[in-house]
Image (tube, rainbow, N blue to C red):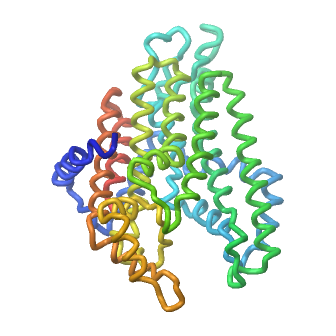
């Protein structure tokens, strides 16, 4: 599918790029993203960037956090994961819960299940339970019940995402060097990452069961499986010898970065008993938004002069994958040889420059714009509202750097 539509996507993205008011290379882009998220949180009514903190601050994980102090001074990835989570790293998209809540508000109640749903005029967030006993609950009680299921789903989504972030903090001890820190501390860090991630996943699954909706359980469970498969594919393809093509990259990226948000958006519609068409549009919106965000993250080291030198070079990043397909395997092998040092190690700054000199970066930009536009197109299926406008701003922000 992807290669056949390559020229069409490029044309669409280039056309939309001309309509934007901010250049892709603008240094003010992070503020656009932060503003879009901050405005969206005002509509929901409370900050959602730390929705999983209730679980993270439990007694069990508080004891774990004390033990993590042993890793200070080492290069264990778990420390970087914790730092990115606390400082709300843009690359980790800590707004999945926020997007689920905004989409719930934008969609409103289902017209086919009005007898089961109570109109929530404050937050616009609805639950499948609706009114348990008509006329026997106060407005405040209705409001609380109406928010519960979709807000719980949003929290579950954040918990699952955080769990996988923690699991990504497991280091391959085969590549351990003395500069990383003592081996026993690195081993200890791996144990902490495994147990902490499993704890978060267990809490997410418990909350998922409490939603009492088998279709939602099926959707989110399949999303967890997708993420596992995607991360496995990602780890096996992040080498200089891998032969990952564009189509395979797109499939792997959806599994590891898009499936959770896409299926959570669909599940939010299912909780309010929306029809299949609304569920499909919600799924489409979540898919393209997350794909666009991943492309945005992959592009930052290539379009930001300040980020290029310090960022970790990834062979599975979109510009690198596209560059390899454009130049061909033979020329790619030559470029790898040309950037090797006397110690037969790769000079990643030179390799970064080689990728930037070709069309891989511009192609990734075009695809990022395409996914952003498709997300905007999908959200138009829902009624005009503040929530929809906030989602439109978030979708627009992923095409800016």
- Disc tally is 0
Q: Choose between 370 and 161: the one closer to the eye.
A: 370
Report which quarter residue 167 is drawn in.
bottom right
* On screen, residue 118 above or below 308: above
x, y percentage for residue 70?
79, 73
x, y percentage for residue 380?
30, 31
Q: Choose between 11 and 18: the one closer to the eye.
A: 11
Q: Choose between 70 and 227: the one closer to the eye.
A: 227
Report which quarter residue 304 is drawn in.
bottom left
x, y percentage for residue 192?
78, 61
Residue located at (47% from left, 65% from top): 315
* On screen, residue 369 above or below 72: above
Q: Where, quadrant-wise, is the N terminus in this rendering?
A: top left
Would residue 47 be visible to someone looking at this image?
A: no
Residue located at (32% from left, 57% from top): 364
- Judged from this view, the residue extending furthest toward the front is 330
Q: Choose between 213 and 364: the one closer to the eye.
A: 364
Residue located at (71% from left, 71% from top): 174
Q: Where, quadrant-wise, is the C terminus in this rendering?
A: bottom left
Would residue 52 be visible to someone looking at this image?
A: yes
* On screen, residue 35 above or below 159: below
Residue located at (49% from left, 33% from top): 265
Q: Is residue 394 left or right of residue 211?
A: left
- Judged from this view, the residue extending furthest toward the bottom is 342
Q: Is residue 184 left or right of residue 79?
A: right
Report which quarter residue 18 is drawn in.
bottom left
x, y percentage for residue 253?
47, 49
């Amino acid at each position: 599918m992807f290669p056949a539509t390559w020229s069409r996507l490029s044309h669409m993205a280039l056309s939309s790029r001309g309509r934007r008011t901010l250049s892709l290379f603008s240094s003010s882009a992070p503020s656009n993203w932060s503003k879009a998220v901050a405005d969206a949180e005002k509509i929901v009514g409370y900050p959602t960037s730390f929705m999983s903190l209730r679980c993270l601050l439990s007694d069990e994980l508080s004891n774990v956090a004390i033990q993590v102090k042993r890793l200070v001074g080492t290069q264990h990835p778990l420390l970087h994961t914790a730092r990115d989570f606390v400082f709300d790293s843009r690359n980790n998209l800590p707004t999945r819960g926020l997007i689920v809540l905004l989409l719930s508000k934008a969609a409103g109640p289902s017209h086919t299940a009005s007898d089961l749903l109570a109109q929530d005029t404050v937050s616009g967030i609805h639950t499948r339970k609706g009114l348990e006993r008509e006329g026997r609950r106060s407005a405040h009680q209705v409001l609380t019940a109406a928010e519960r299921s979709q807000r719980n789903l949003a929290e579950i989504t954040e918990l699952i995402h955080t769990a996988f972030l923690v699991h990504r903090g497991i280091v391959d001890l085969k590549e351990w060097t003395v500069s990383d820190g003592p081996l026993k501390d690195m081993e200890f860090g791996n144990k902490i990452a495994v147990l902490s991630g499993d704890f978060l996943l267990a809490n997410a699954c418990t909350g998922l069961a409490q939603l009492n909706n088998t279709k939602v359980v099926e959707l989110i469970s399949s999303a967890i499986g997708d993420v596992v498969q995607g991360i496995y594919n990602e780890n096996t393809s992040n080498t200089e010898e891998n032969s990952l093509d564009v189509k395979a990259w797109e499939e792997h990226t959806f599994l590891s970065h898009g499936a959770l948000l896409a299926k959570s958006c669909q599940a939010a519609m299912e909780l309010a008993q929306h029809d299949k068409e609304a569920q499909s549009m919600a799924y489409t919106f979540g898919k393209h938004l997350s794909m666009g965000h991943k492309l945005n993250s992959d592009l930052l080291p290539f379009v930001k002069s300040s980020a290029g030198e310090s960022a970790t070079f990834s062979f599975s990043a979109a510009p690198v994958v596209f560059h390899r397909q454009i130049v061909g395997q033979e020329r790619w092998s030559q470029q790898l040889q040309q950037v090797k040092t006397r110690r037969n190690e790769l000079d990643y700054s030179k390799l970064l420059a080689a990728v930037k000199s070709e069309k891989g970066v511009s192609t990734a930009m075009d695809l990022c714009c395409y996914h952003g536009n498709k997300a905007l197109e999908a959200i138009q299926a829902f009624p005009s509202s503040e929530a929809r406008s906030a989602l439109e701003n978030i979708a627009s922000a992923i095409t800016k750097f």
